[in-house]
Amino acid sequence: MFSNNAPRILIVGIGNVLMGDEGVGVYVIRHLEKQTLPSDVACLDGGTGGFHLLEPMQQPERLVMVDATADGAPAGTVQRLQPRYSTDYPPTLCAHDIGLKDLLDSMYLLGTPPNVTLFAVSIDVPDGVGTELSPAVAGVVPEVAKQVMAEVKVGSRS
Amino acid sequence: MARIVVDPITRIEGHLRIEAVVENGRISEAYSSGTMVRGFEKILKGRDPRDAWAFTERVCGVCTTVHALASVRAVEDGLGISVPRNAELIRNLMFCAQYCQDHAVHFYHLHALDWVDVVSALSADPKETSRIAQSISRWPKTSPAYFSDIQKRVKTFVESGQLGIFANGYWGHSAYRLPAEVNLLAVAHYLEALEWQKEIVKIHTIFGGKNPHPNYLVGGVPCSINLEEMNAINSERLNHVGQLIKDAIEFIEQVYIPDLMAIAGFYKDWGAIGGGLENYLSYGDLPTLGYNQPDSFKFPRGAILGRNLNEVHEVNGKDTEEIKEYITRSYYKYSGGDAQGLHPWSGETEFNYTGPKPPYDLLDVDNKYSWLKTPRWRDNPMEVGPLARLLVAYGKGHEEVQEVVNDALKRLNVPVTALFSTLGRTAARGLETQLVVQWMKGFYDDLVNNIKNGDTRTFNDANWEPSTWPSTCDGVGLTEAPRGALAHWIRIKDKVIDNYQLVVPSTWNASPKDHNGKRSAYEESLVGTPVANEDQPLEILRTVHSFDPCLACAVHLYDPDGKHIQQITVT
């Protein structure tokens, strides 16, 4: 199995739940936390965590990330991506202060390049703060969670 | 006259825009603008005040703990709750851990590359770097082979251009002045600091249950102490904290401070640049006898006007004549007219965007030009942050502070006026870290002693039940975030939040001009700054970064111009 209680696969939801749809990654984690995960898989509400996420993200063999993107596609569009470098990532709404990209760059610098599958959920640019998801984005949360589960089950050994 | 625009100015993803007018190689006027809508306060209305910390903590991913602390203090202040001694100590430990992590990350990852030329480091002689490293510190990782290895690793990334961190610098700029060997030393420690910061924040996980966004609690801390119990703060966890503090002391004393002093030695002229405002404000923090006893704080409370260190003024967050927010140049409207200033207890958050439609070339600086309000203390613009904290402490005769400050001035052989500068601000951050890491050890020892003496209380349940609350009450939670004075004001009515206002450090420092046309800290500090190359305004970055801008907590949304669609790899 794995040592240090670190999971082999970590699902990380990124986002700011105070910014409406921008927090969709965290909502997917909250949805997944109610389900039974394979024993070598764990969930992390990454919030707006910045460099605080470096260690939890360095430990697993694989990362499955969920994040919002403002890529112009209709809200609720879900893409599965396998980005390599930070420059491969779609544009975020960047409420994450030390950006996710800086974090990923750091992982390369430290010799621990991440193996990432990213589920990017397209959102409209929010017009204000809010603690609720829009109907279009709320509606895809269960579907994203399902896709994430399918992804980790393929990779899981348990 | 040409205006230089720097947007975004934070090296990391940011939401701060600076426009500066340059005449004859010097900045003659500057405008600082928060480009994201703020209005976070609206979310809190109508909620249970005991839950407010969990929302406010999400405002910012850099200083996750400080908003939670300000929030629980505001509620405790309003409801007349005092926390047990252990809770105070644990909060202080989390506070100190946050400072150590945040200041080191700022120095190495957000600010160092303004002074350190990464590309130059690639041509350094690792043997000479090793010699320099050994001459300034007894830190063990100093062999030529070690630096040579770092050099190779970084070279690969710089050449590939794949890492944003190294792709976006003004490498080769004439204002970079470190020898290649010192640049290499700093780059090596950039990487070591990344590894080290992962450790120190474990203190948050241990006491706060999780990280990021650890748990807080109105009335205490949400962890129980039981030396024998698996799931409590037990002996093993306490020992772990003790070890993390010991390691932190070594890193700060043997890496951060020697690097800071070595780099500062090459940039002494920046001790006369970027001073800006002459007024400094600190709410103070790290209570040792309770939050209501500011005289017991490690960081004292007070205000300095006109750089007169001989007189430190009293500061009272509850006096409605002291702190007021103006919106003359901010995209808001007040029900009583935009000319007035409002104390946060009667603060209003009504948007009124009157700026140009994005994307735009220049801000309309003759009208409103920022999403940040303009806070004032007794109508004075104030600088907040490490320099303000140290100056207030210095002025109040704080011996430990006077000692580290005087020692640093002596070692750098610079006059006391060098404190009022970009260099002074950056040095102050390191010097206070040196103190904070030692104080953290003291709080830890006190906590261990308390527990040994049988005191395991971490929560005071007095006034927890809303049935005990008055029909209305007001509270203020003052704290010092790593980047400066932070406060939350709450008004509780009929058991729920009636009004909630945050005044964050970057609002003090990065706000636009006020109703009297007076500049705030960033703007004032930029005036007079030399700019060698208008296409590469490295000097602007140096001064603004010296404040440690953290705009995401000052402003919450941004308005993308849609031009930045990057290539997406779909598989």
Image: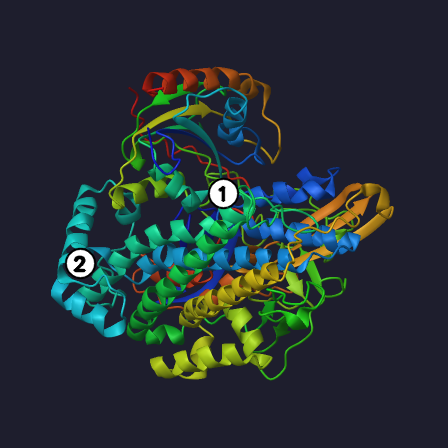
| Left or right of B39 in this view: B275 | left
Task: Give B202 or A136, whichever is nearer the viewer.
Answer: B202
Mark 1 surroundings: few (<14), some (14-19) or many (≥20) residues within 10 A = many
The amino acid type found where label 1 is placed reads Pro
| Left or right of B367 in this view: B261 | left
- Determine which of the numbered discs, if any, sits on residue B118 in the image: none
Q: Which image quarter: residue B187?
A: bottom left
Task: Give A137 or B298, whichever is nearer the viewer.
Answer: B298
The C terminus of chain A is located in which quarter?
A: top left
- Chain designation of label 1: B
Is residue B91 positioned above or below B35 on the image? below
| Left or right of B393 in this view: A88 | left
Mark 2 surroundings: few (<14), some (14-19) or many (≥20) residues within 10 A = many
Label 2 residue SS? helix
Q: Residue furthest front?
A: B228
The N terminus of chain A is located in which quarter?
A: top left
Is residue A18 positioned above or below B387 on the image? above
Residue position marked by numbered label 1 in the rendering: B212
> Where is residue A136 drawn, in percent x and y?
55, 18
Residue position marked by numbered label 2 in the rendering: B147
Q: Residue at x 34, y 36 (%)?
A: A3
> Where is residue B26 drawn, in percent x and y?
38, 68
Q: Which image quarter: residue A30?
A: top right
Task: Give A135 or B273, whichever is nearer the viewer.
Answer: A135
- Can residue B39 be seen from the camera position used here? no
> Where is residue B280 drawn, in percent x and y?
57, 71
Label 1 residue SS? loop
